[in-house]
Amino acid sequence: MALWEQTVKLPYDVMMTIKQHYNEVMPIEIRHFLAPWLEERIFPSMNMQMDYDQQHYEQIATSFLSDFIHELETRAPEFMGTNVTVQLCFTETAKKLRLRFQHDPIQLFGHLTRCMEMEFSYVNGRAIPNQNAEIVEINDMLYKLTQFVAANEEENRQLKLDYERFSLDYHELFKTTTYVKTLTDPKELEQRKLQLNEQHKRLNEFLNAIQNRQLTLVGKFKEVIGQLQQAHELIMVKQLRQWKANQGLAGNGAQLNNNLEIIQQWCEILADNLWNTKTQIQILFKTRQTINVPIDPNLPDLLEPSKKEIINLLVKLVTASFVIEEQPPQVMKKQTKFKATVRLLVGSKLNIQMNSPSVKVSIVSEAQAQHVQQSNQYSETLNSGTIMNNSGTLEYQQATNQVSVSFRNMQLEKVKRSEKKGNESVTDEKFALLFQSKFQIGSGELVITAWALSLPIVVIVHGSQESQSWATVTWDNAFADPTRIPFQVPTKVPWTHLAATLNMKFKAFTGRELTEANLQFLCEKVFRHGTPNTLNQKEMYITWAQFCKEHLPDKNFSFWEWFYAVMKLTRDHLHNQWKDGHIIGFIHKKHAEDMLMKCPIGTFLLRFSDSELGGITIAWVGEGDNGQLQIYMVQPFSGNDFKIRALSDHISDLPQLSMLYPNIPKETAFGKYYSAYPVKPPNPTGYVERRMVTQVPGVPGHTMGSYPNTPNHSLGMLSPDHTRDTPSIGSSYGQPAMGINNDIGIMFDELELGMFPTNFQSQQN
């Protein structure tokens, strides 16, 4: 049986809950008329975000939105003349979906998936296969809580009616008592007194019953408050705190499980139940005051404490739901534009946006952030710098059902730095953006101040500070406790935790994660251990100083500086080759030599340089002068080298290289990345085009005969960079520099360079 056929048989109150959720994006009527179509397309995708990457999921969501709108527009004419209301519903829904979700189809697809999961849960006893147990627990808790509050509301309404009925009966009793006092006939007086006593007895019993029901209702209010507190802990403390922690991990490259829409739905249900309970308490309180009923003075007044608890919970909910949805950049350069977005998750339910609350942004130091968090107090003058365009207004975005404000043109003008201690530098100093606002709820009866601190920020003024700044940010994002005092982090962590962070970071930069062998190499490098595969990674702890402060042996840079430079080089120039798995990269020089010595001549591999920041070298096996196998290594290429000529072209140029380790022909591995050189007509000036070709001199595999038309030139030759300390074979490209002692030089392709025209001398003069 189709899911919708079972759903419509659910109790009325459950259907109302389901309807409420569907109505956030479309009328429930669409679910009814397109039930088979929707189920056919959404069922296979339930929980698919757990199995597919974000890009695949987004493609499916985009396709669904397009097909859904087309289905609505196609089916609408079917109702012409028979049900005009449904026809208009289909047409208007198609327009609204296109307008609201064309830039965010995942929101629609995810919401409808959750709605269908909700149906499935109710139809099957609230148990969805493979769904997160905590999500099931929260949904179940909120469902029961909403039913409980609704039952209290009905009881309160009946109680008010009974109070009114009692008031009328009491008034009649008073009139009867007054009348009896006027009687003079003893017989009638006695009869009336008996009736009056009976009436008085019944009224007392009714009053006692009402008062007992009132006490019971007040007890239920307290029970609701307890459940609200429990739900608040699960949602606002656990789930929302985890979402914030995930923002930090996303800063290190993790995929953010952006369940903020689900959390907002939970917050809105909490807000509804809080406000409803607050209203019920006020109604009961007002009923007791306005209806002239004698109340037993010995009965404790439990309403006032309950009201205070509800207000406190409401304040906690509003302040906790003020979140930074889009974090500012964590490495921030002065005089550079940046953006951020804040959002109030309960704003639309409490109509907070109706008072146009202003949000102001300031930059605060670590000490100031600690003061705000620990005291929950701040002033508008609290800052450690000047930010331009730092104020905005929270507004309701109808297309997304969000109350938010986006700051698109903020710019840090000035920053006040604290006094440094010991070896601290500006790249160790953490700041944060403080977002602050005031909200009015109801008719101004409640004014709530709220603030939110961003993830830690490092402020720089020069690009040379970028690497160390990212070390500070990466360590903080990975190892900060969500309940910490800003911005305290451990000074020592297990290596396996840092390895996972480096892997996450490298994958985000380059598109492919590190292998176990890569991580073993990094472990040996950071702990300055020269013997491969002898360290037990699980037993190692690494300090902050080892990570990014202390220099590697015989080097003038730290482990992090080396690793960061490799990441940038790979991202900017080696992305495709790394994703293809054709760069080993992280391997000891001795290990690479041992591997290659077992291979045929011409086999080569690529490894990152140990001695140069952001360098990569080609190592290959060739024949030495004595006829024995010999390992050669080209001087490391840098990012600047690859701006002139790509790695694949360098590999193509060198005839010594034939087979990528272990046995992949180089044309197969790198051929698709070779630069194409289309034939062009002669230049009007008389010159013909040239191109640069890499060569290594004095190494078997290269001969001058390969380039028979290359002219000799008397200019000085281009020598290797003597500042490099890597014992490698030189390579060169850039200017014609051939001839002397057949040393290093660059060869120009005979088909593209050719010879100068015969009138070369006259043109030079």
Image: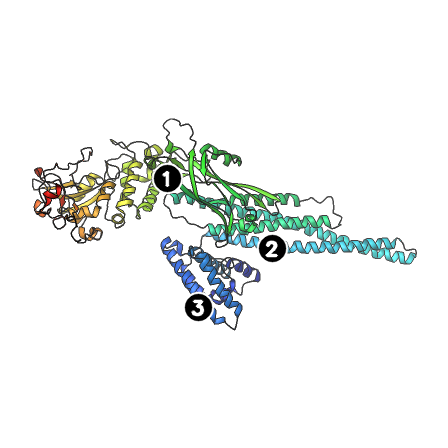
Q: What residue occupies the far right of the structure in this picture?
A: 185
**Foreground mark, 2 or 1?**
1
| Three-letter residue code for mark 1 | Thr
Residue 251 falls in which quadrant of the image? Answer: top left
| Three-letter residue code for mark 3 | Thr
* Residue 236 locus on image (x, y percent): 50, 46
| Three-letter residue code for mark 2 | Ala
Q: Is residue 179 above or below residue 552?
A: below
Whichever of labels 2 and 1 marks the residue nearer the N terminus, that label is 2
Whichever of labels 1 and 3 marks the residue nearer the N terminus, that label is 3
Under circle 2, the secondary element is helix
Front-lying residue, 684 or 237: 684
Q: Which residue is mark 2?
A: 150
What label does residue 74 carry, if any?
3
What label does residue 332 carry, if any?
none
* Residue 740 locus on image (x, y percent): 8, 37
* Residue 498 locus on image (x, y percent): 35, 40
Q: Which residue is mark 1?
A: 474
Q: Is residue 113 at least partly visible in the picture?
A: no
* Residue 500 locus on image (x, y percent): 34, 43
**If the image is split into quadrants, where does the C terminus sit?**
top left
Whichever of labels 3 and 2 marks the residue nearer the N terminus, that label is 3
Measured Cα–Cα span from mark 1 to mark 3? 51 Å
Measured Cα–Cα span from mark 2 to mark 1? 48 Å
